């Protein structure tokens, strides 16, 4: 997997960057370790971390794969902000501290690697896309456009890391988090989907826990408008179903008719 990290060829041209990397086997043991790394123009923070791993600390744990902001593996925190190591250039921090730490919201495995397995367990509970009819079916450009941005998600879980419900309050049993609001939105807003995930949103997925501060949108490396385009419209659907008396009555009536039709069939 690993290719050799490029280092400056001429010693005289070298400049150096100083960074600190949080290291430890448990959250309690984490402590910042200082490193000095040769600077190459255009290098990203992942390059610096890998240089340390390759030249000084072979047991430094860091997860990465594509180095192209596509696989979502290298999520961490840089100066306290959730970011992709491979998409953050070091020259952004010229004259400033550069501190690299693991994602705070998830259990630590070692150094910069966290256990994000909880997210995959949540994903299993979400009913998949359920086509109302067999393909082929017609979809209009505006329908495609509406759900397209949700499919850009690379599952880096930076939005989960910054979500205050998960990060500050460890509300893993109360709220699925922004990543799964986009996943649910991608199904619910598909014009040919016949599934119904509104009861899930109202119940276990806990959409009411989100107070739409937009912090998830700010850290999304794919620029998905998570709050405006996924969470708020889904909240409106939940409100329509459960809190609008007229719509609630109409929905219950529809359900009753469907149940009667099933009984007769
Ligand atoms: S290594 Fe794939 S997103 Fe950073």
Image (tube, helix red, strand yellow):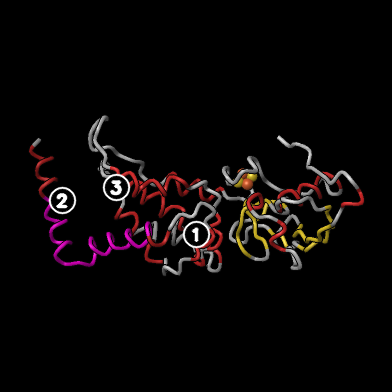
How far apart are the two marked residues, 3 and 1, measured between alpha carbons?
Answer: 34 Å
Q: Quadrant of residue 80?
A: bottom right
Marks 3 and 1 in Cβ contact (< 8 Å): no
- Element under disc 3: helix
How far apart are the two marked residues, 2 and 3, measured between alpha carbons?
Answer: 29 Å
In the image, what residue occupies the spot 85% across and 56% down? 15
Q: Nearer the viewer, residue 52 or 105?
A: 52
Task: Estimate the x, y position of residue 37 in percent, counting from the top left.
Answer: 83, 54
- Element under disc 2: helix
Asked if residue 155 lies left or right of residue 228, the reply is: right
Q: Is 243 inside the magenta-drawn segment? A: yes
Residue 172: numbered disc: 1
Task: Estimate the x, y position of residue 115 in percent, counting from the top left.
Answer: 61, 50
Residue located beneath label 2 in the image: 255
Which residue is most to the left? 264
Residue segment shown in magenta: 229-256
Give the class, few, some or many, for how many residues have Cα within 10 Å of label 2's Cα (few <14, many ≥20).
few
Asked if residue 242 lies left or right of residue 231, the reply is: left
Give the class, few, some or many, for how many residues have Cα within 10 Å of label 1's Cα (few <14, many ≥20).
some
Please state which of the two labelled residues, at mark 2 or mark 3, is closer to the viewer: 3
Residue located beneath label 3 in the image: 142
Disc 1 or 2, which lies upstream in sequence?
1
Task: Estimate the x, y position of residue 132 in percent, counting from the top left.
Answer: 23, 38
Please state which of the two labelled residues, at mark 3 or mark 1, is closer to the viewer: 3
Task: Estimate the x, y position of residue 254 in percent, counting from the top left.
Answer: 13, 51
In the image, what residue occupies the spot 46% across and 53% down? 179
In the image, what residue occupies the spot 67% across and 51% down? 113
Q: Nearer the viewer, residue 15 or 194?
A: 15
Asked if residue 60 lies left or right of residue 145, the reply is: right
In the image, what residue occupies the spot 29% across and 55% down? 199
């Amino acid at each position: 997997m690993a290719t050799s990290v490029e280092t400056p060829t001429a010693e005289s041209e070298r400049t150096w960057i100083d960074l600190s990397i949080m290291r430890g086997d448990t959250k309690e043991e984490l402590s910042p370790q200082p490193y000095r790394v040769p600077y190459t123009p255009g290098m990203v923070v992942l390059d610096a971390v890998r240089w340390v791993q390759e030249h000084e600390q072979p047991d430094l744990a860091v997860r990465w794969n594509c180095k192209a902001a596509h696989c979502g593996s290298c999520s961490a925190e840089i100066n306290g902000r959730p970011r992709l190591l491979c998409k953050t250039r070091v020259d952004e921090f010229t004259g400033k501290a550069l501190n690299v730490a693991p994602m705070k919201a998830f259990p630590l495995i070692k150094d910069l690697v966290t256990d994000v397995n909880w997210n995959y367990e949540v994903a299993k509970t979400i009913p998949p896309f359920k086509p109302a009819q067999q393909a082929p079916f017609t979809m209009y450009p505006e329908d495609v456009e509406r759900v397209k941005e949700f499919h850009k998600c690379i599952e880096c879980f930076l939005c989960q890391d910054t979500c205050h419900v998960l990060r500050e309050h460890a509300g893993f049993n109360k709220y699925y988090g922004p990543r799964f609001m986009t996943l649910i939105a991608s199904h619910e807003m598909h014009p040919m989907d016949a599934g119904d995930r509104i009861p899930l949103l109202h119940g276990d997925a806990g959409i009411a826990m989100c107070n739409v501060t937009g912090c998830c949108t700010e850290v999304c490396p794919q620029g998905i408008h998570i709050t405006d385009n996924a969470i708020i419209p889904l909240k409106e659907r939940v409100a329509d179903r459960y809190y609008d008396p007229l719509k609630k009555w109409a929905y219950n009536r529809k359900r009753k008719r469907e149940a009667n039709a099933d009984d007769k069939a």
